[in-house]
Amino acid sequence: MKLLEMTTHDFAALAPSLAFLPLGTIEAHDLGPLGTDAIAPERIACDLAERFGAVVLPTMPYGLVRSLAGHPGGMWLTEETYRALVMELIGSISLSGVSRVVVFNGHGGNTGALREVLPEAGGRYGTLTALVDWWTAGGDIARRLFGGGAGHGGSDELSVVFSDRPELLPEWDGSRSWRAVEGAWAWPAPRSSIRYDDEPARPLERGAAAEYYRLLLARLEEVVMGILTGWDSIPRIT
C-alpha cells in the first residue's frame, strides 16, 4: 500500500496506524546505480508492508553524503535540513492518525542523524519510531553467501537492487572495492565500492542474489515483528 497511489478517501477508510518510511541518498556505488540507497529500502518496505498492514510513505531519496561527495552524480542535504525534513514528515503524517513509523534506512551516513531525530520526533508528536539499517541486520547472511564481496556498492546492495531491477545486476567479484582501514580516512573515498574485511569475495551470481534477498526479508520481518510486539507490551497510562 503506497501512499502515493491511494486517494484521500482510501487512506481515511483504511485508517492506518503504522507507516514504513524508506530513506536513502544519492551517491556513487561503482557498478550499482546512484540511487541504490533509495531503491533498496523502498523495495524492502513495499515487500514487508502487506505482512504488517503498513502504508508505505514516499521514499526520500536525499540524505547525507560525506566521503563519496567527490564522486560524480551525488546529491545531498545538509544535516540541519535533513533533520528538519524527517521531523516535519513524521509530524505531518501523525495528523492523519499514524502513530507508529518504522524507518527503513538505505544509507549508513544517515544513521547518526536518524538515531537522534527519531526519538525527538517521537517526543514531540507522540509517535513511536524505529530505525532499521537493513544491511547491518543482514550482515551475517551477506558474509555467509558473499564472503568479502559484501559492503558499500557490493554484493548485498546489488542483490537488493537486483530484486527490484533484474536488468541492473552487473558482473561482480569484489575486486573493484577499496579495502577500508580502521584509523585511515580519505576524501573523497578512493573508490565508490568499499569492503570492510579481508575474506575472499565470491563472484555474485543470480541464484545467490535471490537467496540473499529471501533470507534478508525473513530476517527483517522478524526484526519488525519484535519491535511491534514490544511496543504493544508497553504499559499505557490511562
Image: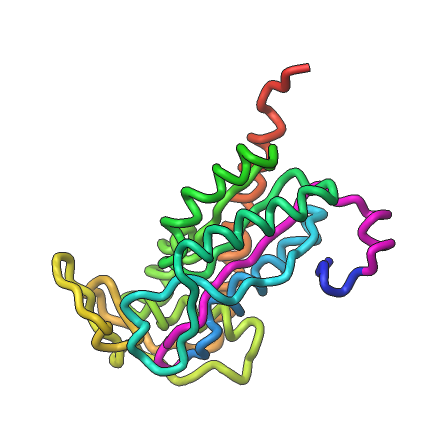
Identify the magenta region.
7-31
Q: Residue furthest left?
A: 183
Tell me what residue is drawn at x 41 percent, y 66 percent: 156
Task: Name above or below for residue 50 compared with residue 168.
Answer: above
Tell me what residue is drawn at x 66 percent, y 56 percent: 56
Horizontal side of 165 relative to 116 (left or right) equals right
Tell me what residue is drawn at x 36 percent, y 66 percent: 65
Of the pair 149 and 6, the residue shown nearer to us: 6
Task: Please state the horizontal and vertical placement of residue 145, each as a whole percent of the image.
Answer: 37, 64
- Is 28 within the magenta? yes
Q: How is the image coloured?
A: rainbow
Of the pair 56 and 148, the residue shown nearer to us: 56
Task: Please state the horizontal and vertical placement of residue 83, each as a whole percent of the image.
Answer: 46, 51
Task: Name above or below for residue 97 compared with residue 59.
Answer: above
Task: Name above or below for residue 13 compared with residue 135.
Answer: above
* Whether residue 208 can be seen here: no
Q: Quadrant of the C terminus?
A: top right
Of the pair 87 and 139, the residue shown nearer to us: 87
Q: Quadrant of the N terminus?
A: bottom right
* Whether residue 136 can be seen here: yes
Horizontal side of 236 relative to 5 (left or right) equals left
- Is 135 within the magenta? no
Task: Please state the horizontal and vertical placement of residue 101, each as a whole percent of the image.
Answer: 60, 44
Task: Name above or below for residue 135 compared with residue 25.
Answer: above
Q: How many marks?
A: 0
Residue 2 sits in quarter? bottom right
Residue 58 sits in quarter? bottom right
Q: Residue furthest top?
A: 238
Task: Please state the horizontal and vertical placement of residue 88, each as a whole percent of the image.
Answer: 58, 49
